[in-house]
Amino acid sequence: MNTKPTALCLHAGTRLITMSEMLKEKQPKQTDTHHPIRHVELVKLVEDNLDDIKLTVTSREFAVTPNGKVFFGLLHVRNNVEHDDYNWTIGLRNSHDKSLRAGIVAGSRVFVCDNLAFYGNVVMFRTHTNQIEKDLGERIRSMLGKVLDSFKTMDARIAIYKARKLQTDEAASIVCGAAMDKVIDDQMVMPVLRYYQQPTHKEFEPRTAWSLFNSFTEIDKKLGIRQLPERMRKLHAFFDKVVGATN
C-alpha cells in the first residue's frame, strides 16, 4: 500500500487503499431497500466518462474507514490547463453502511499543504436504493457535463482571491465575520488568524485573500473529510462576498 502522506490520510479515521485492493472487494450485502455498490464501481463510472469532457486523470488517492465500509477518493485531473500551486480535483464518496450517499463533487487541492476545497455548485448524490446500478451512470454523466465549466469558474475565483490585498485589521475582521455567520466555529477564530499571521509556507506570505482562504482550509483539515464539502460550500460563498466574486 502507498504510505506517502496525501490529502486524504491527513484526515483522522481513514487508511489509504489502492485500486488493486478495491478490485478484490466483494459485493456488499444488499436488501430489498438498501443497494450499496462496490467503491470501485463508483470510481470506474467516473473515470469511464472523463474522456467525454477531455479530462485526464493525473493521480488518484483512495481511503476507507478501518472497517472498509466508508470510502473517500480524489481524482486529480487536467486538460490543457496547469497551475503552479493547485490542481483540479474530483472528490468521491461511497458507503456500505447507510452513513453516506454515493457522491461526487468538484474541487481543488493546493500542492504545498494538501489543503482541499470542494465547490458545492457541481455535485451529485445518489442514495443506495433500488435502481442505483441502472441510473447512477446517467447521473454521473450529467454531473460531469457541468464540471469543466465549474473548474474554469473556480480558476477565475482563485485569481480574484490572489489579487485581493488585505490589511491586517481587515483580515481579522473577515475571520470574525466568518464566525458570526457560522461559517466556522468560534474556537477556530484564533487558530485561523495565527496561521494567517505566521504562515508555514512561503506561498502564503503575500497578504491576500488567497492566503487567508488557505488559513481557513488548513485549520479545517482537523474536521475530517466527511464535513469538508458542506464547510467549503459555505466558506466559498462567504469569501466570494468578501472579494466581490459573486456571480
Image (spheres, rainbow, N blue to C red):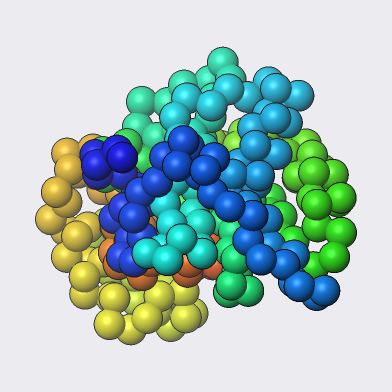
Q: Residue at x 37, y 64 (%)?
A: 66
**Residue 164 visible in image:** no
- For residue 139, above or below residue 148: below
The residue shown at (48%, 37%) is 19
**Rendered location of residue 204, percent (x, y):** 24, 44
Q: Quadrant of the N terminus?
A: top left
Residue 176 lies, in percent from the top left, at: 34, 76
Picture quadrant where residue 110 is located: top left
**The furthest residue to the top:** 80
Near-viewer residue (147 or 167): 147
Q: Is residue 46 left or right of residue 162?
A: right
Pinpoint residue 23: horizontal percent, then vertical percent.
Answer: 54, 40
Q: Residue at x 46, y 36 (%)?
A: 20
Number of numbered discs visible in the structure rendering = 0
Residue 137 vs 47, above or below: the answer is below
Q: Residue at x 46, y 52 (%)?
A: 117
Up-down relation of residue 85 to residue 142 (above or below): above
Question: Is 144 on the left or on the right of 70, as rendered?
Answer: right
Residue 174 drawn at (x, y percent): 37, 68
- The answer, for residue 27, to whether it is visible in the render is yes
As drawn, is 140 to the left or to the right of 182?
A: right
